[in-house]
Amino acid sequence: MKIKKILAAMLSFAVVAASTSISGFTGATKSASALDDCNDDWLHAEGSRLYDMNGNEVWLTGANWFGFNCSENCAHGLYAADVDQFLSAVADHGINVIRFPISSELLLSWMEGTPNPVSSVQAGYEPPYVDINRDFVYEDGKTIKNSMEIFDVIMQKCKKYGLKAFIDIHSPHSDNSGHNYELWYGKAGITTDLWIETLVWLADKYKNDDTLIGYDLKNEPHGKRAYDDTCPDNIAKWDDTTDENNWAYAATKCANAILEVNPNALIFIEGVEQYPKTEKGYTYDTPDVWNAPADQSPWYGAWWGGNLRGVRDYPVVPESGT
C-alpha cells in the first residue's frame, strides 16, 4: 500500500517521541513464530498526528538508547545486559519505539565498507565463562562483530519484539560529549554533503524494512548570536538563506534526499536555539544588545533545538512530499 510522502513532524525532543492520541500500535512482545515480516507497517503524519497504513491513529511511547554516537560505536550497556532480555523487557514495559543516537562519522565508516569496531561489549557462548549476546559474535563463538553488523542485529531484535526504531544524528563526530557541538557538519571531516549522503545510504539500506521507521536529522542544533557586530557561522540558524549553517535549508535538502529513496520514512526536524524578532525587523545580521532586557533584545531564546519560531516564517516543506 502506498503511504503518503510527508514530513513527519516539526518536533523538539531529547529522549521521547510521541504523538497525541492512542491507537492499537503497541509494544507488545512478539514471538519469533509471530514475527511480522510483511514490512508494510510504515507510519505517516497528518498535521501533528501519526497514522498507520490503515488510517489508525498511533501513539508512540519512546525511549532513547545512547551509544552509537559515542567512541564505543555501540549501544551502551551491552557489557552487562543481553540484548534479547533487554529488548523483551523494554517491550513488556509498553515502550514501542527506540531512538538510537548515532554519529555521521560512524555512518560514513559503514557506507565506505570499513565499519568501525566496537568496545565495551560482552558477547560470546563459552559457558560457564561467557554466555551473552550470542548473535554479536561470529561462528567461533568469541570474535565480536563490527558496529554495523551489531546495529543490524539490534534492528532484527527490535522487529522480533514488536519495537520500532529511528536514528538520530547526535553529532558529526563519534564523541560521548558530541551533543555539545552545535552543527551537523564541521567535525571528523563531515561536510553537509557527507551528512546527507550517509543518511540517504542508511535510508536506502533499510527502505524495505519497516523496523527503522524514521530519521531525526540532527540532535539539538543550537548556538547563540555573538555579542558583536558580526554574524557567526558557527551557530545553527533558521532563515531563508542558502548559508551552510541555515538549518531550515539543510534539513529540507536532507529530507528531500531521504524521501527520494524511501518515501515511507518519517523525518524528524528539531528547532534551533535562537531566533530573531522578525516582526520587529530583526535578522541574524542584527547586532546583539549586551545584557538587554527581554523586551529590548532582538532575539527569542530557547533551549537547544527548542526554538521553532522560524517554522512560521520559513516552513520546511519537502518537494518529495504529497
Image (tube, grey):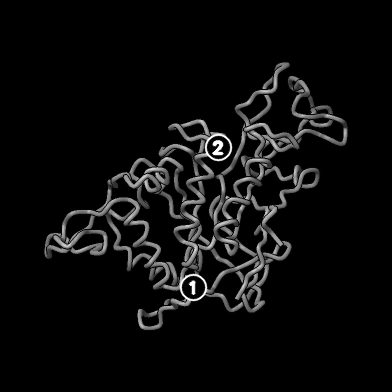
Of all residues, the one furthest to the bottom in this rendering is: 33
Q: Which residue is mark 2?
A: 192
Please name the amino acid that badge 1 sits on: Asn
| Residue depicted at 57% across the width and 53% down the height | 258
Is 109 on the left-hand or right-hand side of 164? left
Question: Dividing the picture into quarters, in which one does residue 112 lie?
Answer: top left
| Residue at point 74%, 19% (across, down) | 290
How many numbered marks does the figure carry? 2
Label whose residue precedes the other's in the sequence (2 or 1): 1
Q: Name the quadrant containing residue 55.
A: bottom right
Looking at the image, residue 188 sits to the left or right of residue 20; the answer is: left
Q: Farthest top residue?
A: 229
Task: From the viewer's perspective, tell me whether residue 120 is left or right of residue 244.
Answer: left
Q: Quadrant of the N terminus?
A: bottom right
Badge 1 element: loop
The quadrant in which the C terminus is found is: bottom right
Q: Position of residue 238 (x, y in %)?
A: 71, 38
Q: Is residue 214 above or below residue 160?
A: above
Q: Position of residue 118 (x, y in %)?
A: 29, 47
Q: Amino acid at mark 2?
A: Thr
Q: Residue at x 35, y 40 (%)?
A: 71
Q: Is residue 228 above or below residue 30?
A: above
Q: Residues within 10 Å of mark 1 (few under 14, many from 20)?
A: few
Q: In the image, is 116 to the left or to the right of 293?
A: left
Identify the secondary structure beneath mark 2.
helix
The residue singled out by tag 1 in the image is 39
Q: Nearer the viewer, residue 120 or 37?
A: 37
Image spot of residue 63 (x, y percent) = 50, 59
